[in-house]
Image (cartoon, helix red, strand yellow):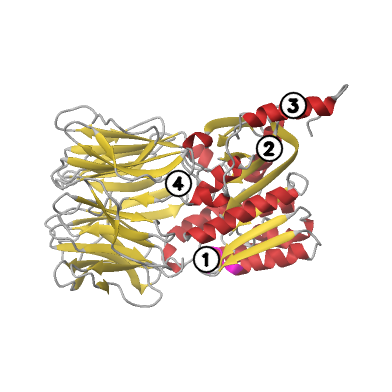
Amino acid sequence: MHRYLGFAAGAVAALMATSALAQAAKVYPTRAFFETTRYSLPTQDGHAFSPDGTKLLISSDRTGVFNAYVLPVAGGTPTPLTTSTTDATFAASWFPKDERVLFTADQGGNELNHLYVRGLDGQVKDLTPGDKLKAEFAGWKADGSAFYVSTNERNPQAFDLYAYDATSYARKLVFTNPGGFNLGDLSDDGRWLTLVKEHSSANSDVYLVDLSQASPQPKLISEHKGNVEHGVYEFTPDGKALIYSTNETGEFSQAWRYDLSTGAKAALVAEAWDVMNVAFSPSGRYRADYINADASTVLKVHDLQAGGVLKLSGLPAGDLTGVRFDAREKAVAIAVASDTSPADIFVADVATGQARRLTTALNPQVDEGDLVEATVARFKSYDGLEVPGILYRPKGASAANPAHAIVWVHGGPGGQSRRGYSADIQNLVNKGYAVYAINNRGSSGYGKTFYHLDDKRHGDVDLKDVVAAGRWLKSLDWVADDKVAVMGGSYGGYMTAAALAFEPEAFDVGINIFGVTNWVRTLESIPPWWGAARDSLYDELGDPKTDGERLRKISPLFHAKNIKRPLLVVQGKNDPRVLQVESDELVAAVKANNVPVEYIVFPDEGHGFQRRENRVTASDAYVKFLGQHLK
């Protein structure tokens, strides 16, 4: 605890604290941070602009539940196309020649998405009916005569590809997945399909399938030696080449071009960070490169005809998280997000680059100036390795008015804490907590060596980074050095429980959000639609059939008797990835220790909370729990 020595120390401290608080932000109720409106554009496989270019198709949770909306390009209020009050519903695509719409929805967060069409009369049809199947929109044929859908209805562990007639919705099976492959991109003419085969967490291949053949067979196009990761971006619109990813030549993923006629390969985009994505405009004139630069997205839109980079003006500072061109390439829709505002939708004139704002996502009752812009901060961990993370410093926090701190651990394994608006984090920071969203070893975005440092060392080296982050926070003069919390979701929830079980003195309170507690059970119950990705996860974490002893050793449930710090657990009942029993059993075990433990289960959520009311309830619980046990 920071203390002041000498005569009238209490009075001096009070005066200094009052001065610091005068500079602090206004304190808002939790709900204010969630009364923002989340907006997103369809994936690059879908059409964001209506056929006449006057409307945008977007997804939004304006009502508290995600639905599909029409947003006028000229400006105005979004109009709902779907009105679900229970299941998160996301826009997939306009039809290219009329205003029918494709959208997806699951059931209460179970991730078993179906694909639906909304007709011109407003009637909705499920295009992928059935129980326990998962379906995804996979793009359009260039002439608009058909669209593609992947579904695992035949084999829960393998996704097949179907072509649907755009008029009758009659479908034809165009590729039967033999298993072990993830479907990649499909060329605009429907001839070429890519597949990705994951051999391990560090080694994967790309295959090419010519669907025009009577019996199409996958052809390996990424021959290599050793561990190299490959992936797929997309085919060029002219159908001459595939753009794929590889980290064969260095630490980071680069974009390479594969010529479909000759098989020649050449580097296309190479940066000092991972190339996250490469996408083309409809004609191929414009190419968007997305770079993961130190936990932020840097977007470059190249004019391949005129040369140079498309200059955009009228946009706020932040990450350009997506661009979608209209069919005539006269306008481009842009999603822009920042630390202090959720993503907003803008539209820009391609000729002038001038952008116009179409949405205001941030709650108008919240002054954006009261929110905290994050910084990228690094510290030296227990063994001297430099570990990065995203640091949020509350306004008014100082040596005279130190803030209690939270180490926030991302999901994964292998995820990344990134810049951008988080209602949960901004709410905590607004309540006076410092938050450090750590990118411990094993996180993506910092090169393949860093990414694989925790392979089969989970609950060990990564946990030591998290513990070291807590010590580092306490060393900062504006952070209170008596208590620190740890929290996170999914894998971050596991790390929270692991910290309390294996390093019981390191943190003073933990918040476990749908975290793994028993790795043997979780790995055995991986949803079947993960398919080949399961083998990759087994390679990284361990196979429960052969590594059961080690997995039990790193599972907090089997060591829950060591937990003596207060714990809050939050869980979705329909979670298909981390089953509710994981949290049930941990809570029961910690209660048996006579340790304060609270438990919240949402009956209508899965792995990640989509409904606004549930998100508010959870975030309110975080603040209340920390207030009781940390401050």
**Residue shown at 43% from the left, 48% from the top:** 203
The count of marks equals: 4
Look at the image and give the residue range highlighted in magenta.
Answer: 574-580
The amino acid on which the numbered mark 1 sits, given as a three-letter code, is Asp
Mark 4, Cα crowd under 10 Å, few <14 / some 14-19 / many 20+, is some
Residue placed furthest toward the top: 7
* CB-based contact (under 8 Å), mark 2 and mark 4: no
Along the horizontal axis of the image, is 631 left or right of 361? right
Q: Looking at the image, which is closer to me, 503 or 46?
A: 46
| Element assignment for label 2 | helix
Mark 3, Cα crowd under 10 Å, few <14 / some 14-19 / many 20+, is few
Q: CA distance from mark 2 to mark 4?
A: 36 Å
Q: Earlier in the sequence, mark 1 or mark 3?
A: 3
Look at mark 4 in the image and give the residue it sits on: 363
Q: Looking at the image, which is closer to me, 610 or 274?
A: 610
Q: CA distance from mark 3 to mark 2?
A: 33 Å
Percent position of residue 143, x then y:
11, 57
The amino acid on which the numbered mark 4 sits, given as a three-letter code, is Asn
Q: Earlier in the sequence, mark 1 or mark 2?
A: 2
| Element assignment for label 4 | loop
Q: Earlier in the sequence, mark 1 or mark 4?
A: 4
Q: Earlier in the sequence, mark 2 or mark 4?
A: 4
* CB-based contact (under 8 Å), mark 3 and mark 4: no
Mark 1, Cα crowd under 10 Å, few <14 / some 14-19 / many 20+, is many
Mark drawn on residue 15: 3
Q: Looking at the image, which is closer to me, 398 or 498?
A: 398
Look at mark 2 in the image and give the residue it sits on: 468
Where's the N terminus, which quadrant? top right
Q: Earlier in the sequence, mark 3 or mark 2?
A: 3
Asked if residue 476 can be seen in this view, the reply is no
